[in-house]
Image: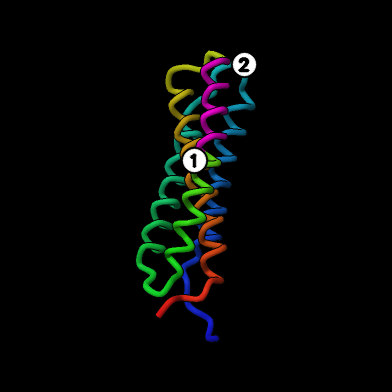
Amino acid sequence: MSERRLPPVTQLGAASMAFVAIGVIYMAAYLPKRAPLGIAIAMVVCAAGLLALNLLLLSRVQEFAWWRFWQVMRWGALAYLVVAGMLEYTFLYDRTHGPLLVLMTIMLLLFTTNVPLLMAFTVARYQAVDA
């Protein structure tokens, strides 16, 4: 079986999650005070840009086990949406509000999208492609 040429989905996803982690750690370092939001916003923009690039590159792949990708993606997304819902509840329970809540929610959504995407890609890349 010849090696298919696939985009660097795993690397871009890991980089996107790293930007999210840096943004969350940066904001958490200032708690209970309010963090300056400039660096956190830059981290969100970088993470979102990498995720968008990742989705664009992946969408252009022709020969791929898309049936397996979507099968894993659906279940992974369901699991991570439950986790994201619980984390969002903790933000609200801790009375996080305003721009900080918006940034934390966006970062949570980016993370919640990246992890199932990486799981689905990792499984589907090794599946046989139906001709």
Under circle 2, the secondary element is loop
Which region is colored magenta?
Answer: 81-93
* Amino acid found under the numbered disc labelled 2: Pro
In the figure, residue 55 lies in which quadrant?
bottom left
Prevalent SS, magenta region = helix
**Is 94 located above or below residue 50 in the figure?**
above
* Residue named by callout 2: 32
Give the residue displayed 52% in from the left and 54% down from the top. Answer: 13
Work out how far the residue at label 2 is from the one at label 1, CA to CA, in angstroms. Answer: 20 Å
Q: In the image, is residue 89 part of the stretch drawn in magenta?
A: yes
**Is 97 located above or below residue 83 in the figure?**
above
Give the residue displayed 56% in from the left and 28% down from the top. Answer: 87
Q: Position of residue 107 (x, y in %)?
A: 49, 36
Give the residue displayed 61% in from the left and 23% down from the top. Answer: 30
Q: Along the line of sight, which residue is nearer the eye, 50 or 120?
A: 120
**Is 72 located above or below residue 81 in the figure?**
below
Q: Position of residue 2 (x, y in %)?
A: 53, 86
* Mark 2 burial class by Cα count in 10 Å: few <14, some 14-19, many 20+: few
Give the residue displayed 51% in from the left and 65% down from the top. Answer: 124
Q: In the image, is residue 115 part of the stretch drawn in magenta?
A: no
* Residue named by callout 1: 43
